[in-house]
Amino acid sequence: MPGRLLVRNIGEFFTGRIDAPTAPVRALLAEDGRIASLDPPADVAAEAVIDADGGAVLPGLIDGHVHPVFGEWTPAQDAIGWIGNYLHGGTTSMVSAGELHIPGLDYANLTPELVTSIAIVTRATTGRVRWSGVKVHAGTVLLVPGMEEAQFDRLAAAGVRFAKFLFFPFADREAEATRYVAWCRARGILVKVHTGGVSRSGASVVCGYDVLSWLQPDIAAHVSGGPIPMPDADVEEVVDRTAFALEVCSSGNYRSTLLLAQRLAERGQLHRLVLGTDTPGGTGVIPRGMLRNILYLASVCGLTPGEAVATATGNVGLAHGLDEGVLEPGRPADFLVCGPVTGSAGSTLADAIAHGDLPGISHVVIDGRVVVAGGSRQTPPPAKPGVFSCCDAGGSRFACTPA
Ligand SMILES: [Zn+2]
């Protein structure tokens, strides 16, 4: 591997696209890390094969809101190995919403130079390499007053792609904040803003419709709470009177999430809904967090299983300018093979998701490489786990282990 990877005997196929979330695809061919074709000819040759045994294939989940610090270590919960654990919960990509858990960081005295340096250092370390195979898009600058355009030049040159308003006092600083958004846009940096009440730091700024209406970010973070949501009337106004992406996180308020999801569905705006966990943090380290978000949206909030999967995959990728999240030729071959767990009310994966039952993951593939095979260490096994095999030089097949 990489070479060619064929997945055959697919029973259910989730595209990751909110407008066409499922398709009658029965086989997928990946080559050199990308999807080469869907339903290739039956006699196609491949070095590696996953026989899905009627199981489901869906895009790898993209956690749109994580808080990394140094690779697999998170001081937020004194834990090591969190990214690898999220991989086994189906997350193949994640986007940092700011590296604010650095021990000793003084939120009351963040300077433009300090936040610029943190983002550049993180981009060059945690954001530079894969962790447990997962794509970690890290090095997200936390915007503070007093920044100059030259700092945005340095951030862009270092490869920083995301900026976040979290500790920025909006009152009387409308012109400055608007200028930052323009500087980001000119450099291809996407802007996210903390919304709702104060966060665990105690130093973040309250943000509802009033600020969002003029700030016009690319993504409003955890609109239903992270942890405290904006008032219901603000949630409704944000849905009705803005057009940017609206994020729901595991750290949020379930009642507000229901309100937001129903409002978006009523208005035909589900393409704006994106998911994240907002972890590690006070909510904890949640390897199955993205799956639980999908289950809540499908089993309580009225989304179809395919729509719920799309809000965790294609929608997140699109909102964050990523290539990942949709299964179609030319895209990265990042996907999961999974199915209902023995004892689940669901006879298919879609049925299980509609019931709110956790899927069992058997295989995780990133860039065409099988990184989890034969079962996740974070979910129960699917009733039909499928088989991963490779081909030796003589053409005979043998059971393989992950790359
Ligand atoms: Zn956060």
Image (spheres, helix red, strand yellow):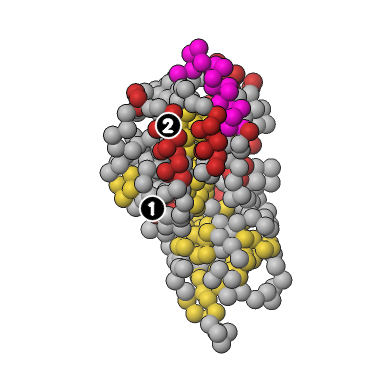
Query: Mark 2: is the Cβ under 8 angstroms from ligand 1?
Result: no
The residue that disc 2 covers is 113
Looking at the rendered structure, the kind of residue marked 1 is Asn
370 relative to 3 in the view: left or right:
left
317 relative to 80 in the view: left or right:
right
Q: Nearer the viewer, residue 219 or 297?
A: 219
Report the residue at 47% width, 28% height from top: 143
Q: Nearer the viewer, residue 170 or 53?
A: 170
Quadrant of the image for the N terminus? bottom right
> Percent x, y for residue 315?
60, 41
Residues at marks 2 and 1, CA–CA distance in whole angstroms: 34 Å
User: Element type at marker 2?
Assistant: helix
Report the residue at 29% width, 37% height from top: 103
Q: Quadrant of residue 108?
A: top left
**Magenta-colored segment: predominant secondary structure:** helix
User: Which residues, given as a range, are shown in magenta?
Assistant: 169-185
Looking at the rendered structure, the kind of residue marked 2 is Glu
The residue that disc 1 covers is 85
Marked residue nearer the N-terminal end (2 or 1): 1
21 relative to 286 in the view: left or right:
right
Q: Nearer the viewer, residue 125 or 47?
A: 125
> Percent x, y for residue 138?
47, 44
Report the residue at 58% width, 23% height from top: 179
